[in-house]
Amino acid sequence: MKELQEIPIWLWMMIAAVLLLQGTWLFRDARDRGQGMKAWFWGIWGLTGAPTPAVCYLLFVVLPDRRKRKAAKNR
C-alpha cells in the first residue's frame, strides 16, 4: 500500500483526466452513431480503464460502422 502513496499527485490527476476524456469520447461517439442505451455502457466502461475500452469500441463499433457506410455508398 505504501507504493500507492509514493505516486505523485500529478500522475493521479493525469490518469483521472485520461479516463474522463476516454469515457466522454466513447459516450458521445456512441450516442452520435445511434447506439442508444449502449452509449452509456461504452461511456461507463471507458471510465474504468485505458486503453482496452477504446480498442474494443474501435473494433466492435467504429470499424463495422465504417464498413456498412462504405458498402451503402458503393451500392
Image (spheres, rainbow, N blue to C red):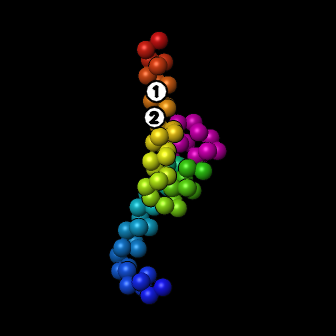
Where is residue 59 shown, x and y percent of the image? Answer: 47, 40
Task: Judge the density around disc 2: few (<14), some (14-19), many (≥20) Cα neighbours within 10 Å.
Answer: few
Is 31 contained in the magenta span? yes
What distance separates the C-alpha of mark 1 from that of mark 2? 6 Å
- Which disc, if any, is residue 63? 2
Q: Is residue 67 visible?
A: yes
Q: Which residue is farthest right?
A: 37
Where is residue 21 shown, x and y percent of the image? Answer: 43, 57
Q: Is residue 25 visible?
A: no
Where is residue 63 shown, x and y percent of the image? Answer: 45, 34
Instruction: Tell me if residue 6 comes above or below residue 12 in the rendering.
Output: below
Viewer-closest of 46 and 55 = 55
Is 43 situated left or right of 37 in this image?
left
Instruction: Tell me if residue 15 comes above or below residue 34 in the rendering.
Output: below
Instruction: Tell me if residue 9 comes above or below residue 20 in the rendering.
Output: below
Q: Which segment is the magenta one? A: 28-40
Residue kind at label 2, given as amino acid type: Leu
Name the residue at 43% across, 81% down: 4
Name the residue at 43% across, 14% down: 74
Where is residue 15 shown, x and y percent of the image? Answer: 41, 67
The secondary structure type at the circle numbered 2 is helix
- Assess whether mark 2 and mark 1 are in contact (beta carbons under 8 angstroms): yes
Name the residue at 53% across, 49% down: 27
Residue kind at label 1, given as amino acid type: Arg
Q: Which residue is mark 1?
A: 67
The secondary structure type at the circle numbered 1 is helix
